Amino acid sequence: LMNCGDNNVSLSHNISMIDYTTSSAAVKYRFGKFGIGLGLLKSGVSDIEVRTTPGAVLDKFDSQNLSVNLAMSYQIYKNISFGVTPKLLYEKIYTDEASGFGFDIGTSYIKDNINFSFVIANLGSMNEMNIERTKLPSLVRFGGAYNYKMKNFDLLLALEGNKVLDGGKFHIHSGIEAGYKDFLFLRAGFMSGYETKNFTAGLGLRYKGIMFDYGFIPYSDALGTGNTFTLGYNF
């Protein structure tokens, strides 16, 4: 929200390993120094089989997570913006369910073709599910990007550090995007510190405000691939 100048609406769907899916819908709007956005994120696994002993399936159930987000940002000084995103959270596994509240806070600096950002995400808590609470994966993200513009080509370089605060590994996310005439975009990325993934690829198309993006993540250990499809419109 803080880094995008256009008003935008987008829909996204991800199909990942072991039938894990994530779908999202978001809209954002800027007016003056203020920005506001509303997002809905749903993820989970369907048709998980219930067995007490080897043999016939006794039942099937879903594991679902839902987040409703309200993002707000304000340009506090020249090229510096600050934002906060409160989130209503809900999760359900079989017959057990829980709800909670979380929020993200962050700041960004944008000048010419350079962008720096810092975010603390997933602060908050959940109610008990059965006998235990789900602990939110609070994390810190920071990084920057540089956009080099030529006559018909754009080259975007990005680098980010990412760490879950409660004992998580430090991950480095890096990426490059080559754009042609603001119409065709080819992307590649690398992620460090993960056991089952490190390389990503993708492409994008843009025409008169309409955007289509595809992302691809191959997993190791025969876990399959991740595929993300996003459709957006700038207005």
Image (cartoon, rainbow, N blue to C red):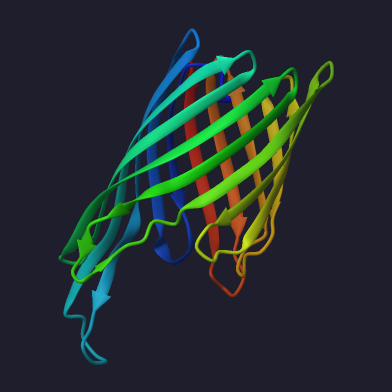
Q: Residue at x 22, y 67 (%)?
A: 61
Q: Position of residue 209 (x, y in %)?
A: 54, 17
> Is any part of residue 40 visible from this angle?
yes
Q: Position of residue 40 (x, y in %)?
A: 33, 37
Q: Please, is residue 147 above or below residue 160 in the view?
A: above
Residue 59 picture quarter: bottom left
Residue 119 picture quarter: top right
Q: Position of residue 195 (x, y in %)?
A: 62, 70
Q: Please, is residue 133 above or below residue 201 in the view?
A: below
> Is any part of residue 1 visible from this angle?
no
Q: Position of residue 41 (x, y in %)?
A: 36, 43
Number of numbered labels in the structure image? 0
Image side of residue 21 versus residue 149, left or right: left
* Of residues 15 and 171, the one drawn nearer to the viewer in this rendering: 171
Which residue is situated farthest in the front direction here? 77
Image side of residue 65 versus residue 205, left or right: left
Which residue is situated farthest in the top direction here? 32
Image side of residue 226 versus residue 179, left or right: left
Q: Residue at x 55, y 60 (%)?
A: 225
Q: Please, is residue 219 above or below residue 84 in the view?
A: below
Q: Residue at x 40, y 54 (%)?
A: 21
* Of residues 124 and 151, the one drawn nearer to the viewer in this rendering: 124
Q: Residue at x 59, y 65 (%)?
A: 219
Which residue is situated farthest in the right direction here? 150
